Image (tube, coloured by chain):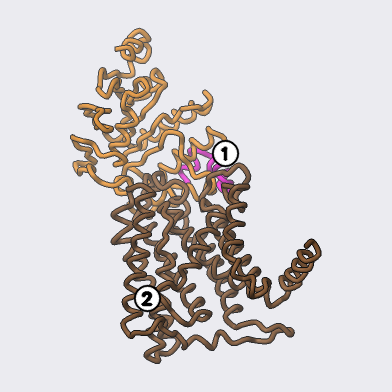
Amino acid sequence: MTGLLASGLTDFLSSAVDPQVQVDAIGIGSIYALMAVGIGLVFGVLRLVNFAYGQLVMAGAFALAFASDRDWPVWGGIALCFLVVIALSLAMDRVVFRPLRTQSAATMLVATFAVAFLLQAVALLIDQSDDTLGEPAASLAKLNLPWTIWGTEVRKITVVAIVTAIVCLVALVLFLGRTTVGLQMRAASMDFETARLLGVRANRVIGSAVLVSGILAAVVAVMMTVQQPLVTSTFALRETIVVLAGVVLGGMNRLISATLGGFAIGYASGLLGGALPTAQSQYLPSFLFGLVIVILILRPGGLFTRAGGAVERV
Amino acid sequence: MRYGGVAAVRGVSLEVRPGEIVGLIGPNGAGKSSTLHAIMGLVRPSGGDVELDGRSLRGRPPEAVARSGVALVPEGRRIFGELTVEENLRLGLSGRRSQDGASEDVERVIEMFPVVGEFRRRHAGVLSGGQQQQLAIARALVSAPEVLLLDEPSLGLSPTVTDLVFGALETIREDGMAILLVEQRAQRTVALSDRSLVLANGEVRLTLTPDDAGDTERMIQAYLS
């Protein structure tokens, strides 16, 4: 029995250090990190865990499928994806979040559940209108082809995902650190009431956070659609749940810890998915969430927060 | 003004003119901070009005009140500890009606509170209580308000820093700003202010002038009334 376990562990470790598995894991971690930033930004200013974030990604994926179906050029599809996701994100804030802003966190959370399931139901109706399950978004499929780098096959989308995530995160750091709106967003996420007393416009700050969050959702939609070109109403649902777990795991109160949490859970997911034998990959979600529970019991404030659970934001 | 069914402030009427300090003193729970919160739009008064230059501020959100020319130095300073001193000042600029002359105002405020300039690159959280209070006042002043509200600015400060803060208030008054000062240090506030209202149980019980500051008996009576 011990020998069997040791042999299994050796196989797992040798697969885990495989460069291709590592690169894929980093690629998944990068996408999840961007989702975590999108969720963390809105949480920072609204204290709202937006469960409907995945449906923004799904809407973007449907936009890409729509454009692909009509043979639009790739840039046209991407532009439509951004337009749809950003518009939906801002509409979500204007129609649902803004009127409920002064209500309890529980009320707002339930509202995001309602929005999520509403969007999913609408997507299902659209999907079923042609009597087939799923809408193909094939125009970006070229990005799924591999490059061979130093003998390792790396999918183009993995490189694109890693580079895009780095660019987005650097841009976000500059935006938050160098611009007045960025400064106001950071202040609002620390103490919104004081920020407002200083003249910081609540609607402007929240609108900016929702906008940036929407842009990131659109970026994620493009990258995920390349990897999963069949778009269904449950597109990005599982990923959102995993990322939410990652955000809590990393520590919700700071954007950096939430981002690291998102990356870590994406990386772990990619690593386990790539290294585990196919027959055992069915245990991946239970193992992953089991690990989340253990870590939260050990560090309830989050894996990447300072000891003592200091409540600091962004 | 009511919290639930409880009236926190009743029938308080006060006016602060440019170049004037009005003190608001009284025991804990008298309704001093609640009055400031009502002015800033943090709580909606159940009746009455708040006017600035004849324009009503009632029902406006806090950011709109701030942008119309009222700045609050809140109790407990509430500076952003994770941001630098300079970033805290930049946030103060959010409340300005115009950005013209902003850098001159910042320089003038730094002249008044040199510690703010000295530590401008440091995180505000590492400053001492007195330094944080100076930053909180500086942050309010860079918004170039017409009216400055201060909620217990000397709370927890050493006598030296308290002197500095009260000295700064005199300078600000001379510049023509209207100041409403909520304080626990009654005698000092009465001496500094053009007039001071003694608040108890949400009502104005007495109005004192600087001449009353030396009359300890009257001060005690005012508090016990």
Q: Which chain is brown?
A: A
Question: Which residue type carries mark 2?
Answer: Leu
Secondary structure at numbered mark 2: helix
Q: Position of residue B187 (x, y in %)?
A: 39, 17
Q: Quadrant of residue B48?
A: top left
Residue in the foreground of this view, choosing between A206 and A153: A153
Q: Position of residue B19 (x, y in %)?
A: 31, 33
Q: Position of residue A250 (x, y in %)?
A: 57, 55
Q: In the displayed structure, does residue B1 sit left or right of residue B66?
A: left
Circle number at residue A79? none
Question: Which residue type carries mark 1?
Answer: Leu
Circle number at residue A83? 2
Disc 1 chain ID: B
**Label 1 to label 2: alpha-carbon separation:** 45 Å
Query: Which residue is at a point 52% across and 53% down the rendered structure image?
Result: A252
Discs 1 and 2 carry the same chain letter:
no
Closest to the camera, between mark 1 and mark 2, is: 2
Q: Which chain is orange?
A: B
Mark 2 neighbour density, 10 Å: few (under 14) some (14–19) many (20 or more): some
Q: In the displayed structure, does residue A282 sit left or right of residue A222?
A: right
Mark 1 neighbour density, 10 Å: few (under 14) some (14–19) many (20 or more): some
User: What is the residue that sits farthest to the top in this orientation?
Assistant: B217
Can residue B108 be found in the magenta stretch? yes
Q: Position of residue A155 (x, y in %)?
A: 61, 82
Q: Which residues are magenta?
A: B107-125
Circle number at residue B127? 1
